[in-house]
Image: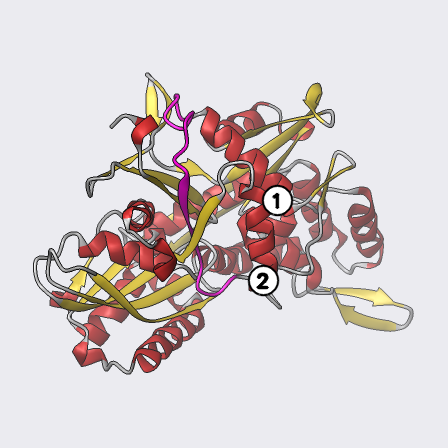
């Protein structure tokens, strides 16, 4: 495909990974690959790394994607690594992140991220189509999530890239992708398991060649997904070693250490921001009054030595290993602490059982909104990295039967479908 003649671009800006697809104007799409001749990949990690440099923006240089990880690993103590920043897009509690004493709003980080994504596309995105279709969750993650605020921030993030932008629910993009594989009419349920949210859409698919192939019936979502599952592992294996559940003395009273520090430590969007003088001074004061100060010392060491990325990398490896085995070894070493544990899949499934119940309730909400019974769903399409977790697959097998479940393109189907929507005469019909 000549990228200069691409008719539309589909952007799946994800909490963990981002993917871009280009539509060719004739019903086909192509995924954009990032890298060079030695290594190319269509999946671009949604991460940023900052370090001080005079020639950088406001005296701060930056990198994104897997290159951000490389920069961080080369100099973890002299850089700031940010991941999952999409999770604060709709948060009125988040105003800016202070990085090397410079304020960065969500839209600043998003704009810098997209600039580097374009730069690493090997020229494939040097000429952008006028029409860009961007995926957005049905329900944003975070407390008091404000969709209107997220829209303002997305608009500001994307204003330099195009004037014709459409926002479409992510599972509807996946539905469009899956519909291209169907040869007969069907009512489908799409379940998209991302890093920050799990979203559902019910879509009626007409026969191939129909004037309008897909008709959305209802959507629902919940701010529980892969990042929450990671936190369950951190909560069980790591946080007790950092003081969670222990006490500190306040005058003549013995009180439990406030949970807010542990909540921050378990959230990527806040963990990276804890390495500042005020927060560390507060934790050191807490350490002086703690019954077990050595546990709080471990937390301080992990924050000061920027161990957030390797910690969550180890958690992610464990989670993926448990998708293919009944048990797996968790190992983390860094910041002066070392953790090793043999974890059974049955234990992990118990840790996330309440989350899965809430996810199932959100799915039921979509069925109710569509006025459709589970028995009337012809096909179920599971997408997103967490759809590979066996307990999630079991949930859908139980509700719909194995024969109705379809998978594939777990990380790329949304971008593919968004680009296809961009080819339609009126993408606004799908816009959220």
Q: Secondary structure at mark 1?
A: helix
Image quarter of residue 235: bottom right
Relative side of 160 to 281, left or right = left
Answer with mark 1 or mark 2, whichever residue precedes in sequence.
1
Q: Tags 1 and 2 in contact by the CB under 8 Å rule?
A: no
Q: Which residue reaches farthest left?
A: 183
Label 1 vs label 2: CA separation?
14 Å
Report the side of 264 relative to 161 (left or right).
right
Label 1, residues with CA under 10 Å away: few <14, some 14-19, many ≥20: many
Q: Is residue 31 visible?
A: yes
Of all residues, the one furthest to the right in this rendering is 251
Q: Residue at x 81, y 56 (%)?
A: 286
Q: How far from the left and from the top, in percent, is residue 43?
A: 37, 37
| Horizontal and vertical percent position of residue 372 | 25, 80
Look at mark 2 in the image and give the residue it sits on.
148
Please identify, in this view, whether the residue under mark 1 or under mark 2 is nearer the observer.
2
| x 70%, y 62%: residue | 260
Instruction: State whether residue 121 is above or below residue 47.
Output: above
Q: Residue furthest front?
A: 425
Q: Residues within 10 Å of mark 2 (few under 14, many from 20)?
A: few
Please provide percent x and percent y for residue 329. 39, 47
Q: Is residue 395 left or right of residue 98?
A: left
**What residue does disc 1 label?**
107
User: Looking at the picture, how far across and down is residue 430, in whole percent?
Assistant: 35, 60
Magenta stretch holds residue 194 = no
Callout 2 secondary element: helix
Residue 200 vertical placement versus 230 (above, below): below
| Between 50 and 429, the one nearer to me in the picture | 429
Q: Which residues are magenta?
A: 121-140
Residue closer to the observer: 427 or 337: 427
Taking the spot 53% from the left edge, 42% from the top edge, the residue there is 158
Quarter of the picture holding the C terminus: bottom left
């Amino acid at each position: 495909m000549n990228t200069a003649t691409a008719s539309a671009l589909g952007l799946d800006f994800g909490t963990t990974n981002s993917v871009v697809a280009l539509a060719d104007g004739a019903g086909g799409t192509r995924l954009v690959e990032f890298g060079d001749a030695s290594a190319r990949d269509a999946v671009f990690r949604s991460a940023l790394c900052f370090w001080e440099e005079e020639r950088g923006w406001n005296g701060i240089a930056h990198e994104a994607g897997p290159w951000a990880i490389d920069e961080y690993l080369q100099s973890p103590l002299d850089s700031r690594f940010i991941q999952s920043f999409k999770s604060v897009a709709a948060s009125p509690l988040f105003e800016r992140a202070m990085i090397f004493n410079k304020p960065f709003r969500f839209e600043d980080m998003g704009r810098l991220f997209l600039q580097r994504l374009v730069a690493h596309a090997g020229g494939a995105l040097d000429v952008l189509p006028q029409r860009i279709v961007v995926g957005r969750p049905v329900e944003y993650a975070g407390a008091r999530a404000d969709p209107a605020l997220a829209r303002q921030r997305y608009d500001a993030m994307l204003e330099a890239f195009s004037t014709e932008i459409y926002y479409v629910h992510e599972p509807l993009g996946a539905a469009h992708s899956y519909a291209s594989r169907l040869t007969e009419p069907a009512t489908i349920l799409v379940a998209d398991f991302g890093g920050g949210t799990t979203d559902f859409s019910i879509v009626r698919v007409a026969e191939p060649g129909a004037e309008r192939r897909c008709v959305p019936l209802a959507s629902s979502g919940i701010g529980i997904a892969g990042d929450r599952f990671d936190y369950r592992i951190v909560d069980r294996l790591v946080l007790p070693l950092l003081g969670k559940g222990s006490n500190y003395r306040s005058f003549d009273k013995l009180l439990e250490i406030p949970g807010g520090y542990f909540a921050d430590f378990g959230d990527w969007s806040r963990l990276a921001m804890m390495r500042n003088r005020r927060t560390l001074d507060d934790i050191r004061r807490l350490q002086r009054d703690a019954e077990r100060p050595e546990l709080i010392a471990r937390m301080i060491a992990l924050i000061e030595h920027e161990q957030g990325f390797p910690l969550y990398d180890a958690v992610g490896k464990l989670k993926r290993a448990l998708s293919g085995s009944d048990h797996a070894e968790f190992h983390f070493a860094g910041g002066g602490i070392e953790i090793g544990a043999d974890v059974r899949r049955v234990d992990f499934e118990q840790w996330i059982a309440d989350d899965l119940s809430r996810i199932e309730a959100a799915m039921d909400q979509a069925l109710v909104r569509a006025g459709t019974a589970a028995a009337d769903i012809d096909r179920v399409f599971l997408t997103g990295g967490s759809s590979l977790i066996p307990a999630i697959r079991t949930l859908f097998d139980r509700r719909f039967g194995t024969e109705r479940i379809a998978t594939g393109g777990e990380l790329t189907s949304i971008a593919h479908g968004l680009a296809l929507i961009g080819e339609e005469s009126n993408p606004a019909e799908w816009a959220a």
